[in-house]
Amino acid sequence: MGVQISPSILSADFARLGDECARVAGAADWLHVDIMDNHFVPNLTLGLPVVESLLSTVTTPVDCHLMIEDPDRWAPAYAEAGAGSVTFHVEAAAAPIKLAREIRAAGARAGMGLKPATPVDAYADLLPEIDMLLVMTVEPGFGGQRFLDVVVPKIRRARELAKGRDLDLWIQVDGGVAADTIEVCADAGADVFVAGSAVYGAADPSAAVAGLRAQAESATGSAWWCSHP
Ligand code: DX5
Ligand code: ZN
């Protein structure tokens, strides 16, 4: 896969979610849905019933980002409901390998998230068990925060680990991803880009997705981690 853009509906109008999702249909690869429980993060958003309603109306694949305690208990249901990708946080999971296997068995791609201060090397042996590693580039909980460039070396390290093991691992970045930060992420090794305020804060969200994609593709073309023919 090449560059993929996953607009976060956290920055959309929750009273008009179906319409807001339709604004990026055809432009976005995924719809990023942030599920927060006010325990793992200090914010509360939505849960399985709303995701089920979205899944019945949207055509874009749904990328669920679970910022919740006890994902071992709750995450498989999102996969069973039809989400294309389900990401849990490793800091919250009691049995991440078992959980990743359950998500895959339920038919979704398994994602594992790392908060900014969580190192990737400690989880190197888990990487074959997942389809996507989410490297948070802000503290999870809120949209519109400033990108933490201290995390960029971790993106690079994650890509090194994936390449070293010859894994087809997607590396997603989430938080503060916008026109001024997406290139450094792509250059370091990210290939799935979540953007909330940069997409839904724009007058034309679909055009914003296209603009971010063009930037990421251009930066990836000359990136160290991309094999050139
Ligand atoms: C934050 C969420 C993000 C958020 C990103 O915890 O995981 O998905 O919506 O928003 P922006 O792109 O505005 O930083
Ligand atoms: Zn997110």
Image (tube, rainbow, N blue to C red):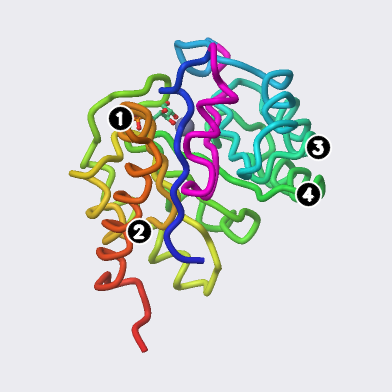
- The CB of the residue at mark 3 lies under 8 Å from ligand 2: no
In this view, the mark in front (1 or 2) = 1
Q: Position of residue 109 (x, y in %)?
A: 66, 50
Q: Position of residue 137 (x, y in %)?
A: 33, 37
Tell me where the magenta segment starts and ends, as one range.
15-37
Say few, some or many: other residues with alpha carbon within 10 Å of mark 4 (under 14 / 14 to 19 / 20 or more).
some
Query: Would you say the residues marked 1 and 2 are in contact, meaning their CB atoms lie under 8 Å apart?
Result: no
Return the disc, 1 or 2, that comes first in the chain's sequence. Answer: 2
Number of the label disc, if any, that sits on residue 80: 3
- For the point 22% across and 53% down, which residue is it? 184
Return the disc, 2 or 4, that comes first in the chain's sequence. Answer: 4
- For the point 54% across and 31% down, which residue is it? 21
- Up/down of 129 relative to 21, above or below: below
According to the picture, the residue beneath numbered tag 4 turns out to be 107
Looking at this rendering, what residue extends furthest in the left direction? 180
Query: Would you say the residues marked 2 and 4 are in contact, meaning their CB atoms lie under 8 Å apart?
Result: no
Return the disc, 4 or 1, that comes first in the chain's sequence. Answer: 4
| C-alpha gap between disc 3 and disc 4 | 7 Å
